[in-house]
Image (tube, grey):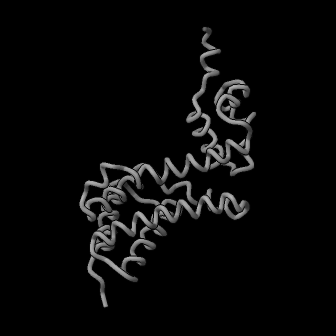
Amino acid sequence: MTKSRRKDRVSKDQWLAQALEVFTREGEPGVRIESLAREIGVAKAGFYWHFKDRADLLDQLLNYWSHEYTEVVTTNDSLQTLPAAERLLAVMEMIWEHDLAGLDLHFHLWARKDAKVARKVRQVLRKRLDYLISIFSEAGFSGDELEMRARLFLTYTSNESLIFRYKSKEQANRLLKRRWRLLLSPPQD
């Protein structure tokens, strides 16, 4: 088999990763089969081994985002064995280190234009919120305190990388640990 033929065998994940990269630069309209193939450096015919059409690619892109940016945390067995406080810190570190909330704005903007996308984004947010509620509940919070802490965590995390720039990784880690302690501190009446 020639070198160029092997290059045409691009995995589904490679197509999705490239589509996600284009999506973050140009939004949903920029995700086009021809341009993806050109950026990957393969013939567009290879696309059809993995996807029926552009609509299928976009559906799978949503699912890819849901899995790679949410379920890698919410279904992570190694996190489940940790006590609530340690699990929360580990989740915060994973989100920060892997920028798991960095694409949220892009998907929210797309959701404003497409009802199907809006439903999927709401499902992802619900999954994240339920996961956080379980952690804060296990940490001893209930009622409004529980709901407020989970929502505060979710809102802050989804917007942090858009709003804040840190001087160094040390500063980011220091402030992350301060947020963690604040989120777990006893309620103030």
Looking at the rendered structure, the number of numbered marks drawn on it comes to 0
Q: Is residue 10 left or right of residue 82?
A: right
**Residue 125 to residue 189: above or below:** above
Residue 167 vs residue 74, the one in the foreground: 74
Q: Residue 54, how many percent across, how many down? A: 73, 41
Q: Is residue 48 left or right of residue 137?
A: right
Q: Is residue 51 left or right of residue 140?
A: right
**Residue 5 to residue 59: above or below:** above
Residue 55 vs residue 39, the one in the foreground: 55
Query: Which quadrant would residue 150 be assigned to in this image?
Result: bottom left
**Residue 120 to residue 76: above or below:** below
Query: Which quadrant would residue 84 be assigned to in this image?
Result: bottom left
Q: Residue at x 69, y 43 (%)?
A: 56
Q: Residue furthest left?
A: 83
Q: Residue at x 73, y 28 (%)?
A: 44
Q: Residue 125, how many percent across, how many down? A: 52, 64
Q: Residue furthest top?
A: 1
Q: Residue at x 62, y 44 (%)?
A: 60
Identify the image quadrant of the N terminus: top right
Q: Residue 30, how many percent across, how many down? A: 73, 46
Identify the image quadrant of the C terminus: bottom left
Q: Residue at x 61, y 20 (%)?
A: 7
Q: Residue 131, how many percent across, how many down? A: 41, 63
Query: Which quadrant would residue 4 be assigned to in this image?
Result: top right
